[in-house]
């Protein structure tokens, strides 16, 4: 699963090498040599957010910070103890952002940026949604994008008409970096070359609320 990045591969290989070494030792030797506290750090610390669609609260109050993690092991511990995206109720979201960045347009890290948007039909919720979302997460935390410093986070929206996954970047004007992120995303998710995905600037989305936002870039 960690095929997204070289740093992720290094973490996986180090675990495999440790297992091989332990198999060649006697049980009493293993007790002395295994470091059970060893964890594999990520390049960034990440925070998972959950949005609950409760109309009695404001949008900001509905956005709940679940947990932050900065190692491979802590990520999997968290991921294995939460619901899959496909199990969330309609109107709910998961967001994964670098720690310190809130999953909202107004945040200083996001306000000049935009998002690559993947639209999924309702019928894809049972097959593609969870795979796409996990692959996106692994690419984010594994720093798979060449311009990973431009990536702020990602959001998955569960909606009645169809679900959405958005990858948010910091600066919509950095065209070359934005387009490269879109190409890598499309490749990692194994999206057909016949399918086009678009990039929308946050400011355009805000200004055109209630209408269709035009894509600034496509791949």
Image (spheres, rainbow, N blue to C red):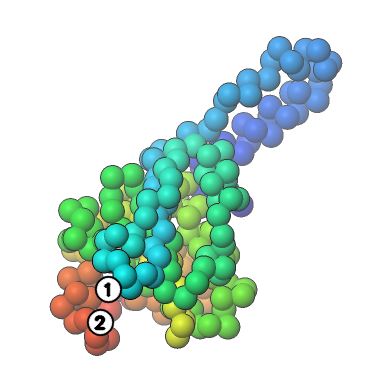
Q: Quadrant of residue 82?
A: bottom right
Count the numbered circles shown.
Answer: 2
Q: Report x, y in % for residue 104.
A: 26, 61
Discs 2, 1 touching: Cβ within 8 Å = yes
Q: Vertically, is 66 above or below 41?
A: below
Q: Quadrant of the C terminus?
A: bottom left
When the figure is inspected, residue 20 is found, relative to residue 189, above or below; the finding is: above
Q: Residue at x 57, y 68 (%)?
A: 87
- State the image coordinates of residue 183 (x, y, percent, origin top left): 41, 66
Mark 2 is surrounded, within 10 Å at the Cα level, by few (under 14), some (14 to 19) or many (20 or more) other residues, namely some
Q: Is residue 61 above or below residue 7?
A: below
Q: Nearer the viewer, residue 95 or 216?
A: 95
Secondary structure, mark 2, is loop
**For this view, does 118 lie left or right of residue 198?**
right
Residue marked by disc 1: 200
Residue 33: quarter of image: top right
Q: Is residue 176 left or right of residue 29?
A: left
Relative depth, front residue between 47 and 187: 47
Q: Considering depth in this image, is 158 or 26 the residue closer to the camera?
A: 158
Disc 2 from disc 1: Cα separation = 7 Å
Question: Which of the two labelled residues, at mark 2 and mark 1, occupies the earlier sequence position?
Answer: 1
Please give the name of the residue rendered at 38% of the width and 40% of the height, measured from the top-left corner.
Answer: 44
Q: Position of residue 48 (x, y in %)?
A: 42, 51
List the residue tagged with mark 2: 213
Q: Position of residue 25 (x, y in %)?
A: 81, 17
Looking at the image, residue 32 sits to the left or right of residue 10; the answer is right
Please name the residue shown 45% across and 41% down the image: 69
Q: Quadrant of residue 30?
A: top right
């Amino acid at each position: 699963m960690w095929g997204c990045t070289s740093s992720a591969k290094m973490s996986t290989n180090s675990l495999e090498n440790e297992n091989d070494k332990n198999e060649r030792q006697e049980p009493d030797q293993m007790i002395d040599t295994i470091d059970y506290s060893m964890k594999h750090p990520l390049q960034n610390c990440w925070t998972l957010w959950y949005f609950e669609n409760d109309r009695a609260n404001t949008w900001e109050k509905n956005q709940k910070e679940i947990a932050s993690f900065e190692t491979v092991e802590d990520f999997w511990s968290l991921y294995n103890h939460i619901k899959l995206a496909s199990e969330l109720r309609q109107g709910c979201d998961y967001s994964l952002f670098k720690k310190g960045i809130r999953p909202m347009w107004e945040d200083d890290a996001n306000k000049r940026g935009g998002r690559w948007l993947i639209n999924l039909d309702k019928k894809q919720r049972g097959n593609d949604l969870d795979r796409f979302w996990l692959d996106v997460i692994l690419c984010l935390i594994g720093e798979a994008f060449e311009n990973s410093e431009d990536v702020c986070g990602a959001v998955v929206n569960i909606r009645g008409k169809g679900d959405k996954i958005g990858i948010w970047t910091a600066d919509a004007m950095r065209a070359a970096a934005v387009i490269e992120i879109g190409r890598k995303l499309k490749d990692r998710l194994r999206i057909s070359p016949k399918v086009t995905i678009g990039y929308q600037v946050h400011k355009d989305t805000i200004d055109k609320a209630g209408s269709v936002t035009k894509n600034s870039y496509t791949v």
